[in-house]
Amino acid sequence: MPFQPEHFAVWFELPVTDMTRATTFYEKVFQTELKLVEDMGPNPFAMFPVKADSGVSGHIYPGKPPARGSGPTIHLACPDGLEATMYRFIEAGGEIVSDPIGIPAGRFVYALDPDGNSIGLFSA
């Protein structure tokens, strides 16, 4: 029988060059508060919040991002619709690199955060 977990993706990590700038960026764009953790693992990191402990999440950490737009893409949920989140993404210093794309589950755009990480903004 093939392996079929409830969630194939279990965690994501986004390397950033400036933790303060990146935390401010993601908090503004997604209208949330990241939780700074300094006493677990080799580096401090800031976690994206989820409702339940079993929710799929991730964090930003001090590191070297891949070349601009060349790394994997993580799709993040928009808090209040695609267009509003796109607006905040641009205002906070990110770049939208595609038009909205419709799929059966919703719509998304490809974007680059200030460090060049590839981000999908997804709205159901």
Image (cartoon, rainbow, N blue to C red):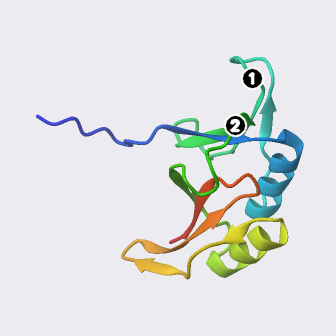
Q: Could you tell which of marks 1 and 2 lies nearer the N-terminus?
A: 1
Q: Residue furthest left?
A: 1
**Badge 2 amino acid:** Lys
28 to the left or right of 116: right
Q: Residue furthest front?
A: 67
Quarter of the image for the N terminus: give it: top left
**Disc 1 marks which residue?**
43
Q: Position of residue 18 (x, y in %)?
A: 84, 42
> What is the quadrant of residue 52 in the picture?
top right
Q: Position of residue 27 (x, y in %)?
A: 80, 55
Asked which secondary structure carries label 2, the reply is loop
Q: Residues within 10 Å of mark 2 (few under 14, many from 20)?
A: few
Q: Position of residue 104 (x, y in %)?
A: 36, 76
Whether pointer 1 and pointer 2 mark residues with C-beta atoms closer than 8 Å, the reply is no
Q: Position of residue 124 (x, y in %)?
A: 50, 72
Whether 18 is drawn above or below 88: the answer is above
Q: Residues within 10 Å of mark 1 (few under 14, many from 20)?
A: few
69 to the left or right of 86: left
- The residue that appears at 74% across and 23% down in the rendered structure is 43
46 to the left or right of 109: right
Whether 60 is drawn above or below 89: the answer is above
**Badge 1 amino acid:** Asn
- Mark 1 or 2: in front is 2
- The residue that appears at 75% across and 68% down in the rendered structure is 89
79 to the left or right of 62: left
Asked which secondary structure carries label 1, the reply is loop
**Disc 2 marks which residue?**
64
- The residue that appears at 67% across and 81% down in the rendered structure is 83
> What is the quadrant of residue 39 in the picture?
top right
Whether 92 is drawn above or below 36: the answer is below
